[in-house]
Amino acid sequence: EADIYQTPRYLVIGTGKKITLECSQTMGHDKMYWYQQDPGMELHLIHYSYGVNSTEKGDLSSESTVSRIRTEHFPLTLESARPSHTSQYLCASRGSYLETNEKLFFGSGTQLSVL
Amino acid sequence: AQSVTQLDSQVPVFEEAPVELRCNYSSSVSVYLFWYVQYPNQGLQLLLKYLSGSTLVKGINGFEAEFNKSQTSFHLRKPSVHISDTAEYFCAVSAGGFKTIFGAGTRLFVKA
């Protein structure tokens, strides 16, 4: 059912590298989100967007940045990756209340490991 | 602000036994409540939701949950679990704004 895609699925990189995690959805949803997931911990909201050219920081401080130039695309960038950035990153989207009744659609996630 | 507490980090259970995964929330305003399931190596998918109306909501795969406003709880139940129900389950709350707040998850292990 989900039409939201994340790439890559797994990423192992060295410290100091710049990386971009891709997220795309084909449902025309205005709202998009990035969550960070660590084992046994809450999913923490790190970024969200209401629509094109709108981005906000979430509840958990993050050194990553996001952009929303097109409705369907919401990439997350780390300018200089560190081992503390090792985590699972989940992208999600949601339509209007009438469209989706508050339901979030999730991608399969990107597991990032920084060595 | 809203918060969600999932009272059990892991729940082991034998196949065909009943199970209850507990969730409590706090909020100063009315909320929408959700349960999401995450199977290994997959994203989260919606199991069921409470928006309004009947406090007993039924979801996919035989799961149901009951909204209890006085106890601020939204426990998830299934009368008979299968091996395939092994997954992580997340309770979540939304106040109808842009944010959905998630609990820490409960890992359900179903043993043969």
Image (cartoon, helix red, strand yellow):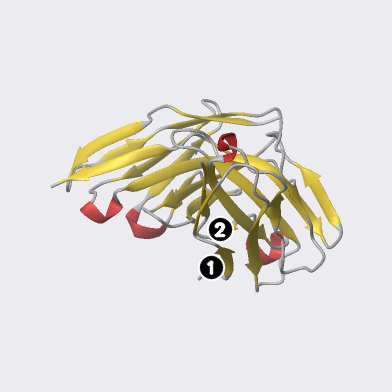
Dot 2 or dot 1: first in sequence order is 1
Q: Is residue B101 visible?
A: no
| Residue B65 spot, x, y in % from top left | 43, 44
- Element under disc 2: strand
Q: Quadrant of residue A102?
A: bottom right
| Residue B59 spot, x, y in % from top left | 43, 55
Three-letter amino acid code at disc 1? Ala
Q: Residue at x 57, y 52 (%)?
A: A90
Query: Tags 2 and 1 in contact by the CB under 8 Å rule?
Result: yes
- Element under disc 1: loop
Q: Chain of mark 2?
A: A
Query: Which of the pair B80/A43 is nearer the observer?
Result: A43
The disc placed on residue B65 is none
Q: Quadrant of residue A57?
A: top right
For label 2, count other residues whose C-alpha is less than 10 Å away and answer few (under 14), some (14-19) or many (20+): many
Q: Residue at x 23, y 48 (%)?
A: B80
| Residue B13 spot, x, y in % from top left | 21, 38
The disc placed on residue A2 is 1
Q: Is residue B31 visible?
A: yes
Three-letter amino acid code at disc 2? Phe
**Vertical arrangement, residue A8 with respect to residue A114, above or below:** below
Query: Which of the pair B65/A59 is nearer the observer?
Result: A59
The residue to which callout 2 is attached is A106
| Residue B34 spot, x, y in % from top left | 53, 46
